[in-house]
C-alpha cells in the first residue's frame, strides 16, 4: 500500500506526521521492518527527513532499533500501552476539571457536533472518522482548559494507545462512548465539575478494559506483547 507523498515544505515535520499516522492506522504494522530508503521512496522524499522522522518516532516509542539488526515499528506491549493509557486518562480528567468553569456555549456546541459525527462514523464503521471525531470531542475540552502543557503531553502519548483504540471503535463498547459523550456534555453544561470528571474517567475506562483483553500472555515466552511477525534480519 502506498503512503501519501509529502509536500516539499517542512519536510521533516511532514514526514513525521505521515509515518506516525501510518503506524497508528496500522498501514505500518507492529513489528514491521523500516528501511529509510524504502520509506523515502514511498513518501517521495530524500532519506534525511525520513531518518529525522524515524529518530523522533523512536524517542516517542513508536519505533525501536537494534544496532546492526533492525529498525521496526514497536510491537504493541501491554505495560507500555497501560502506562500511556493511565497517564492520558489522568490528563484528560485534569483537562475537564480546568475546562468546565471556562466553557462557553460555542465549546458545548462543538462537543455536540463532534459527538454527532462520532455516532455517524460508528454507524458507518468508519474507524478513522470515529477517532477523528472523538479527538474533536475531547479536544474541545482540552482547548477550553487553556493549558498548553496538557495539550502537548496528551499529543505525545496518545499515539501509543491509538493503535489499540481502533479496536474499541469497531465494537459495542465503542458505541457506548456516544452515550458517555452526551452525559459528559450535559454535566459540563450544568457546571458539575465532579460529575464531568467522573464520567470522563468512566469513558476512558473502556480503553483500559480493551488493553487487558487485547494481550494474551504466552507462558512459553512470558511476553505480554501482541505477536508480531518474526524479526527480519539484515
Image (tube, rainbow, N blue to C red):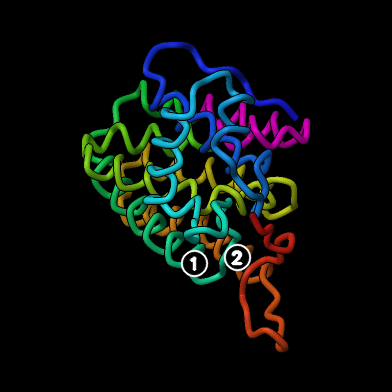
Residue lying furthest top: 8
Q: Nearer the viewer, residue 68 or 112?
A: 68
Q: Main secondary structure of the magenta part?
A: helix
**Residue 210 in picture, x, y percent from top left:** 63, 63
**Residue position marked by numbered label 1 in the rendering:** 82
Q: Is residue 18 left or right of residue 104?
A: right
Helix, strand, or loop for circle 1? helix
Q: Are marks 1 and 2 in contact (CB under 8 Å)?
A: yes
User: On screen, 199 above or below 182?
Assistant: below
Mark 1: few/some/many CA within 10 Å (<14, 14-19, 20+): some
* Identity of the residue drawn at 72% across and 88% down: 220
Instruction: Residue at 66% x, 59% y: name it.
Output: 233
For the residues labelled 1 and 2, the Cα–Cα distance comes to 7 Å
Judged from this view, the residue extending furthest toward the bottom is: 219
Quarter of the image with the N terminus is: top right
**Quadrant holding the C terminus:** bottom right
Magenta-tinted stretch: 112-133
Q: Which residue is mark 2?
A: 211
Q: Residue furthest right?
A: 124
Task: Determine the image quadrant of residue 224.
Answer: bottom right
Answer with mark 1 or mark 2, whichever residue precedes in sequence.
1
- Is residue 203 positioned above or below 129 on the image? below
Amino acid at each position: 500500500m502506498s503512503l501519501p507523498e509529502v509536500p516539499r515544505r517542512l519536510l521533516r515535520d511532514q514526514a513525521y506526521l505521515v509515518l506516525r499516522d501510518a503506524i497508528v492506522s496500522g498501514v505500518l504494522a507492529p513489528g514491521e521492518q523500516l528501511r529509510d530508503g524504502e520509506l523515502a521512496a514511498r513518501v517521495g522524499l530524500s532519506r534525511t527527513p525520513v531518518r529525522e522522522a524515524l529518530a523522533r518516532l523512536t524517542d516517542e516509542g513508536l519505533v525501536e532499533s537494534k544496532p546492526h539488526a533492525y529498525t521496526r515499528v514497536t510491537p504493541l506491549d501491554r505495560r507500555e500501552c497501560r502506562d500511556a493509557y493511565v497517564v492520558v486518562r489522568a490528563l484528560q480528567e485534569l483537562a475537564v476539571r480546568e475546562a468546565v468553569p471556562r466553557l462557553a456555549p460555542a465549546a458545548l456546541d462543538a462537543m455536540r457536533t463532534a459527538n454527532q459525527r462520532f455516532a455517524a462514523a460508528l454507524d458507518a464503521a468508519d474507524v478513522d472518522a470515529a477517532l477523528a471525531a472523538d479527538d474533536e470531542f475531547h479536544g474541545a475540552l482540552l482547548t477550553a482548559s487553556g493549558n498548553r502543557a496538557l495539550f502537548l503531553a496528551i499529543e505525545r502519548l496518545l499515539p501509543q494507545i491509538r493503535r489499540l483504540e481502533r479496536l474499541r471503535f469497531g465494537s459495542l463498547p465503542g458505541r457506548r462512548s456516544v452515550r458517555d459523550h452526551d452525559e459528559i456534555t450535559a454535566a459540563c453544561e450544568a457546571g458539575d465539575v465532579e460529575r464531568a470528571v467522573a464520567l470522563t474517567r468512566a469513558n476512558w475506562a473502556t480503553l483500559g478494559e480493551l488493553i487487558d483483553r487485547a494481550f494474551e500472555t504466552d507462558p512459553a515466552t512470558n511476553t505480554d506483547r501482541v505477536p508480531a511477525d518474526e524479526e527480519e534480519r539484515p
